[in-house]
Amino acid sequence: MHGILTVDDAGAAASARRFSLPPTHVDALVNPEVAEAFAPDGDDVERVMYGYSVFTCLPDGLSTPGSVGTGTVMRPATLDGYAREAGFAGSEILPIEGFAAFRFTRLLR
């Protein structure tokens, strides 16, 4: 698995696609486990991640030319779109539970 922390998520996925290892290798990302869609009454994890996003990750990302400004809170559909834009067939959430407040997503070839 590649660990990627970036302000250019689509570019990072494209790099992972370009430089990935043979087909037996799994390209996966770890990101905050937030709800699949925005809801104003989000849970505690959602609130904390939005705090990080608004005060740290989003301003940092927006200060970098070319950034799409995703921030910390990346919904599964957004990640799937970035994966497809990078040349992957899509993405799937892996059934790994209880890993703090994070989700594992596999990029499909």
Image (spheres, rainbow, N blue to C red):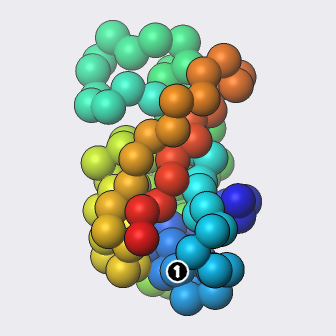
Amino acid type, residue under disc 1 in the picture: Arg
Could you say where residue 46 lies in the image, as x and y percent from the top left? 49, 23
- Quadrant of the snapshot with the C terminus: bottom left
Q: Residues within 10 Å of mark 1 (few under 14, many from 20)?
A: some
Between residues 45 and 21, which one lies in front from this camera angle?
21
Between residues 31 and 18, which one lies in front from this camera angle?
18
Q: Residue at x 50, y 67 (%)?
A: 9
Q: Residue at x 52, y 30 (%)?
A: 95
- Quadrant of the snapshot with the N terminus: bottom right
> Which element is circle 1 on?
helix
| Relative to 36, residue 57 above or below | below
Q: Provide the residue designation for mark 1.
A: 17
| Relative to 19, residue 54 above or below | above
Q: Residue at x 47, y 61 (%)?
A: 107
Could you say where residue 58 lies in the image, as x and y percent from the top left? 52, 54
Residue 33 in the figure: left or right of residue 100: left
List the single residue furthest toward the front: 24
